Image (cartoon, grey):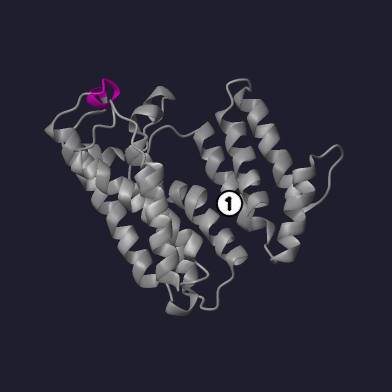
Amino acid sequence: MTVFYAFCRVIDDIVDSSDLSAAEKQVRLAKWRQMLQAAVPDEPLLALEIRRLMDKYSLPPGMLEEIIAGVEMDLSIVRYSTFEELRVYCYRVASAVGLVSIEIFGYRNARCKQYAIDLGLALQMTNIIRDVGKDLQAGRIYLPQEDLARCKYSETELRNRQYNERFVCLMEFEAARAREFFSRSAIALPSEDRRAMVPAEIMGSIYRGLLRRMERDKFRVFEKEYRLSRLENAGRIAAQLLRSF
């Protein structure tokens, strides 16, 4: 998981780098696609480690290429018209990560794949709600345009960080969507794989707590950076560990 996390971190940092042009970012991501397939001259040690990981867990390159495709979307897409369009992004940057992770954790029931997909969508939607203000600074709006229209909250209001009842309506709508995916993931998790999925369940518990905190606070995301305390995180970790036994 340390190697896999390092891979995700590296490709994410490429896209978020302020020192690289869009063209240079594309070149580096393309090189990582090559390195997933075979060794290239002067490649970093991580490339070799990730290929060994792929061999060990029989991970086809396409599984990791999906994650690259997800972060690459940030280079050209800064608005999403519908949730179906956003769902593709969420799947690539979150669900695809979950699908690789469960191969590493080990599972017995194929239904676990649906669990990983739904949990990934729930986590990413929670991220999108939390990071509305930060994403605006980068010129990105992940909230679907159809959802803004549903709540009669304009993009101009959003770019001006106007907090009003229409914004709360929008956030409540997105939070309900995230909670629906959390519920689906809970239903999809096979009982025989609960112990193996404890790391994922810990992440899910922390993010559910984060979502509830934002909901109770009426989504003051323009003025606050939401996170759970170390004590709250520790409590949720302990609860999931105890539940697994």
Find disc 1 in the rendering and name its residue.
66
Q: Image point 87% across, 39% down: which residue?
A: 41
Which one is nearer the viewer's eye here, 211 or 100?
A: 211
Q: Position of residue 210 (x, y in %)?
A: 32, 46
Along the line of sight, the residue nearer the viewer: 243 or 131: 243
User: 23 or 32: nearer the eye?
Assistant: 32
Q: Quadrant of residue 102?
A: bottom right
Q: Which residue is located at x 28 percent, y 32 percent?
A: 221
Q: Is residue 14 visible?
A: yes
Single out the residue that lies furthest toward the right. 41
Quadrant the C terminus occupies: bottom left
Q: Position of residue 104 (x, y in %)?
A: 62, 64
Q: Main secondary structure of the magenta part?
A: helix
Give, as a single range, the part of the protein colored magenta.
156-161
Task: Check residue 46 for magenta coloring.
Answer: no
Q: Nearer the viewer, residue 26 or 106?
A: 106
Give the side of residue 136 with respect to residue 116, left or right. left
Label 1 amino acid? Glu
Vertical position of residue 7 compared to residue 161: above or below = below
Look at 48% across and 71% down and name the residue there: 112
Q: Residue at x 24, y 32 (%)?
A: 220
Bin the neighbour count of mark 1 within 10 Å (Cα to Cα): few under 14, some 14-19, many 20 and up: some
The image quadrant where one finds the N terminus is bottom right
Give percent across and percent down for residue 43.
81, 40
Q: Position of residue 192 (x, y in %)?
A: 47, 79
Q: Is residue 10 above or below residue 103?
A: above
- Residue 157 lies in the magenta-colored region: yes
- Under circle 1, the secondary element is helix
